[in-house]
Image (spheres, rainbow, N blue to C red):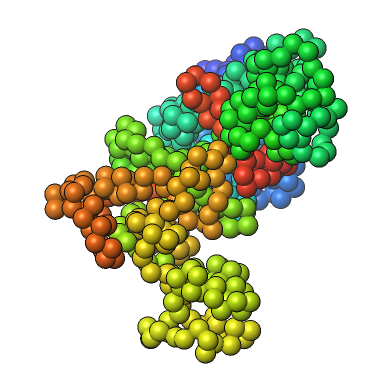
Amino acid sequence: MFNSRIPTLICLILTFFSCRNEQKNPGDEISFEEKSIGELAETSAIAGFFSDSTETKKLNLRSTEAVADFYKTGGYEPVWKTHQLREDLYSGIRAISEEGLEPEDYNEEYLRNSLTNLSSLYGQERVRLEILLTDSFYQLLHDLYYGKLNPEALYEIWDIKKEDIEISMLMKKAFDNEGITEVLNSVKPHHPVYNGLKKSLAEFNSALASEESGEKITHIEEGQIIKPGEEDTRIPSVVKRLKELNISVDTDSVTSAYTPAIEQAVKNFQEKYGLEIDGIVGSGTIRNLNKTREDRREQILANLERWRWFPRDFGNHYIIVNIPNYQLTVVREGNTISKHKVMVGVQARKTPVFSDEIEYVVYNPTWTIPPTIKKNDVIPGAAKDISYLRNRNLKVYSSSGETIDPSSIDWNSGEALKYTYRQEAGSTNPLGRVKIIYPNQYLIYLHDTPSKALFERNSRAQSSGCVRVQDAIGLSKYLLSNREQYSSEKIDSIIASGKTTKVEVTQPVNVYHLYWTAWRENNKTKFTEDIYNTDEEILNLLQKNQ
């Protein structure tokens, strides 16, 4: 009697051997169907991998727990079943250098070799490939959205509101729709500054690759500052380096004299790189003159990483303060409404990186001395000379609001810390005529200043942490422009009255204190001084995490 199972068995055997001998192209379908009878099933093979700590350590996964949970939730089913899925992930890894990340951080070489020789992989080798593809995908999504580094470990204060994402859900979406590329693109920053930095990175990479014998660098030795009119043996090196950096120097012969023509070229360099435009060749100017093209490329990498930390959506209406560039920008529905010069915190009292929403403005504000200034400046000043308070129009108040006679206070005891110190509104008040408030635990806000001449300086790290704004009154009028009762003339009359007046801001406006030191402007890359010295720290940590 004819056995109906024989043809089926023959077909299975032929299929088994044909699969073994088939010449597959790189990235052809990964499958666990080549096992002989008695071998583990696909799901059991993946489950067994995660139960074997030796295997997980050998593969050196970056997201072991998250990948294990992903497979457990999916019943340990393999997910890299099609050529398209694997090729799209590998293409995404190869292209990740455009984002300032390293392909090898996502196992590029291992995956290339494995996918190229897929037909020769069997059993546990294919399990490892399956798992490593998933780990690479998970980590790629994480790093593109959150960044490789944790900014909270870098900054004394980091409080940026950013929506979390469910990476495992995004992965499932990609597998269900064969949409690896779409999901990768969805988590990248798409802000114009980030996209501009990517263009700059491509330009610097191209320039570095085209250098036949390396970049020509004239190194300038550190030493005493060089002032205009002085002589210094380093002046010829300064001139040579300026020319290498395409800074025009209107001089033919160079001696050790620091001439007006060289001074002007130095000022042009200082302006281009966000330095104080004083014509003095000091340590900051020399440090920036000595930066190579590779140094600047790395500065771009640090700033691309920063932008991965920032929110993907700033809202329809917001204010951004770029701390090291000393600039505030108002943006509404993608359009720049206005730009303002600002002053920010000095190195010892940095302006923090955080975000909040504006609530109100105060005209003719009083100034309540913040704790740091009270402890470090006001109390020591009063202890040394009691007239310190009178000269600054400062009054002392108890917790119940009663005025305290300064002469009755023991300034050398802890008693002085218990009191509130306030400066009344007026022309000498350091807050000027208006402050713009978004209540926060850091006691930071935007405000006017009577010292308006300081806005003409190129380097403006001048404050104790708050942000002084050029034309702060104009900015406040804009914030109240949706309230008819607060016309420009009405606000002028409130200011002229000298009376402290609080006005609610009823239109939603987010404010972001951010930090970046490179960007693209007029199709050119711009750099500014890293006033809080974080670029190098970011680069060092990025290299350690590779």
Left or right, 318 with respect to 205, comes to left
- Residue occupying the far front of the picture: 229
- Residue at 27% from the left image edge and 44% from the top image edge: 478
**Coordinates of residue 269 in the picture (x, y in percent):** 63, 26
On the rendered image, what quadrant is the C terminus found in? top right
Left or right for 196, reference 24: left
Q: Residue furthest left?
A: 484
Q: Position of residue 72 (x, y in %)?
A: 52, 48
Q: Is residue 480 left or right of residue 256?
A: left
Disc count in the image? 0
Q: Measured along the vertical axis of the image, is residue 244 above or below residue 468?
A: above
Farthest-out residue, bottom: 408
Residue at left offset 70%, top offset 49% = 52
Q: Is residue 366 visible?
A: yes
Residue at 60% across / 69% down in the picture?
Answer: 376
Q: Closest to the observer: 277 or 144?
A: 277
The answer to which of 82 and 171 lies nearer the viewer is 171
